Image (spheres, rainbow, N blue to C red):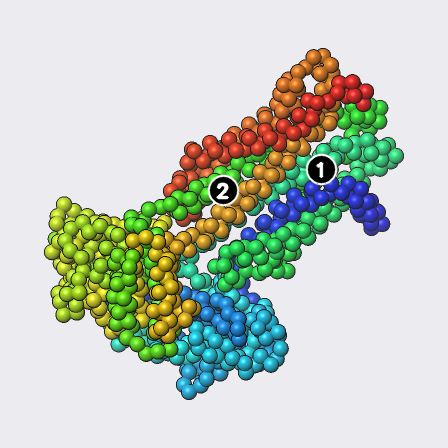
Amino acid sequence: MTAIWYDIRYGVRMLIKKPCFTAVIVLTLALGIGANAAVFSFLDRVILRPLPVKKARELVKLARQYQWHRDNGSLEITEDWFAYPLYVSYRDQSQVFSGLIAYTLFGRSPMSNCSDLSVGNEAEQIASMSVSSNYFSVLGIKPVIGRFFLPEEETGHGVQFVTVISHRLWRRYFDGEPTALGKTISLNNHILTVVGVAPPEFTGTVAAINPGVYVPLGTLAQMNDFPLDHLDVDLLGRFKPGVNRAQAEARLLALAEQMSRDKPSITYINIPISDGSRGTNPWSGDDHFWVVTTLSLFQVPPMLILLVACANVANILLARGIMRQKEIAIRRAMGASRRHIIRQLLVESSLLALLSGACGALIAHWLTTTIRALFPFTQQLDVPVGTDGRILCLTLLGSLGLVFIFGLAPALRVSRPNVMRVLKEGAGAVTLFARRFSLRNILVVIQVAISVIVLSFGVLCLLSLHALRVADPGYDAKRVLAVSVNLKEDSPINIDISQFFTNLKERMTSLPGVQTASLVGSIPLSMESYHNRTVASHIEDFQIPADKQGINWTFDMVGPGYFQTLGVPLLRGRDFSVQDDPGAPKVMIVNELMAQHFWPGQDPIGKRVNVGGGMREVVGVVKAVKLRTIRDKPEPLSFWPLTQPMMLDGKPFPPDGKRCLLIRTQGDPHPIVSFLRGELESAGLTPATYKIGTLAERASELLNIQRTITGLLSAIAAVGLLFVATGIAGLVAYDVNQRTREIGIRMALGARLKDVLQFVLRKGAILTCVGLILGLGLSCIPLWILTRLVPILSYIDEYCLYGVHMWDPLTYFCVVLLVSLIMLAAGYIPASRAARIDPMEALRCE
């Protein structure tokens, strides 16, 4: 123990003695470690981390599989949410759960999970969740102050609106004072009374989402002015002792069938139960797959950069070890064993690892803080500012392991010098040793190869983002202004929403500079964009397969003038008009893809389809354009007039509270925004309750995640190039230092400046070429094999790239050119210094 303590003190002295050496290694490793810790924090919270509750492994989550029968057709559907009455039945009658909770995220509109919070004169957007009264008790959560919800507050009969706020909000708005109890806050224009504060470690039960406000389910129903029984909720529970999964699924299925007897359109198949230790996720289907795939793949570049950093550190340790050959030879001559030398060198590496890990944690803290500041959509994510204790421990352990591994090879190599030759020949032995030693060259090649891989993906993402920005949706999105409002939920006044928007549309079309305007069910190219789906049981002149009772049918609800406002060409037939009212025959317009799919080579005008509760006749064909996102390809789609609303499962469709307005202008649409705001606010709306922007701006919002990924990947690639450039420069500088005498002799014998530059740069150029070839090979060949062995990698093109292929040759040409120029520049500085060496001084110093 005394010997180790001596090694630690000696190692500290050596690191202090060489501050530049210490700083370079610590900064190099800290950048690699910090980037990995920051990215892993996101991955951990979204995919890996269990809920911060007692006995999280006991939690199970429920889903439901059922057949939906409509228009003599049926669809098999799997959903993660349940109607509130079914939750009550499971909670009170199933005899399966010791505790079952219900919850749902909500926001200022049906398409948003963000709510508008106001406390005094301050305001922000937060994630909000509505929960059952037993939510906190089943999870084993205790309030910091106050209480949680009462059973009567869940049902919402004759009680005031109450809320439990997060610990962060309590500290920010109420300074962590107990007097916060009884104070009021405004949430989506509703006043709520604070009755409790959640503990700081609790972040809800939805992965990656950290709610700031919790309200009872009954409160949410009253805020939205609809019956509690119409609320859809996610379910998590704990089994009673002795209950297994098969028994639970059978019992829950029986209750579901009993509850759905009055709904012949639904036939339950199963109530699957799965692990609920990580809660539920805010994404479903393809969105969840895309998020998990992207985050998993995004962890790879920081890991590669960390390998580059470690290779750089190993190179520096090798160079320093070579420079310390005389010191080590003297210690060996004085009786120090090789084991003692290796232990001393590894102690120094461990000290560097601890410093690097600590600095890496600070960099991770800065990175996550910066990401949250630069990209507002991450504010609602349950990602720590910095890293929590678990990530910090992993960071320190990982840095120790990495430096130990990459410090071991230099320690083993430099701990066995030829003592007699080093003591006899001094620097000459070092030069001879350095020439023969090839591990440094191998490490440089590895650095270049990895940088090529990371830079390739960075360039691909940059090209993809550029392609998304300039992509043509099929119409001019810059001159179409979109307005979305949900008056039923947010407006304190009682107003006929459909009539309000109709009048607003007429007023807007009378403004100078406005060409046309139209109502629409959802805004294209935005987060609010969606397509409705139903089943067509009969399609004229199209044979539905015998094994199917219907064909999936996709439609949007639009108003008259929609295609003219959007700028979509009408290819055949006519547009909708005000004459297409509820009393007129049901009509629809199809895009060219749907027409080609169902009626190839035929005229679709006049074709009739039994869909949406009756027969609809095709009256027009329009060009197929992008409407959901700029990334998605146009798909077969039909359009139904908003002037012919219908009943869907006993409810009006589209919902009365959902209307949007599109306005096309002759020039820049922004000058009419102030007039539009005045019209909306005169109806009692506030800026927090409506959204105005061009379709191009709405489409740009959908690129936030792509921008984040591209920006971070570009930063990682830049750091990797910096490491590699440093490695090349260090290698050339070291060679120049060790071969000063040789260079002097060459110049004394008549070598020109050009000859010296070529002589010095040759080694770096050869290593760069080898690294480029290896990097290109690793970028293409193994990835091509892996895409066939690991299916998830085959989705890189589909989910992560747009407008550019994973094997784009121009990308790899640009990468090769960029790396070559940077490596040439990195090696030129020490090479030019070598070319200016005075031959007499070089020979005299030897």
Taking depth in this image into account, of 842 and 197 the one nearest to the observer is: 842
x then y, percent, for residue 619: 14, 57
Residue mark closest to the camera, 1 vs 2: 2
Please identify the quadrant where the C terminus is shown.
Answer: top right
x then y, percent, for residue 706: 45, 50
The crowd level at tag 1 (other Cα within 10 Å; few <14, some 14-19, many 20+) is many
| Residue plotted at (52% across, 46% down) | 713
Q: Name the residue carrying label 2.
A: 458
Taking depth in this image into account, of 782 and 839 the one nearest to the observer is: 839
Q: Secondary structure at mark 1?
A: helix
The kind of residue tagged 1 is: Leu
The answer to which image quadrant residue 833 occupies is top right
Taking depth in this image into account, of 768 and 564 the one nearest to the observer is: 564
The answer to which image quadrant residue 424 occupies is top right
The answer to which image quadrant residue 426 occupies is top right
Q: Which residue extends farthest bottom?
A: 158
Q: Is residue 265 above or below residue 302?
A: below
x then y, percent, for residue 631: 36, 49
x then y, percent, for residue 744: 74, 18
Task: Report the Cα–Cα distance between label 1 and label 2.
Answer: 30 Å
User: In the rendered view, does 106 fall on the left or right side of 452?
Assistant: left
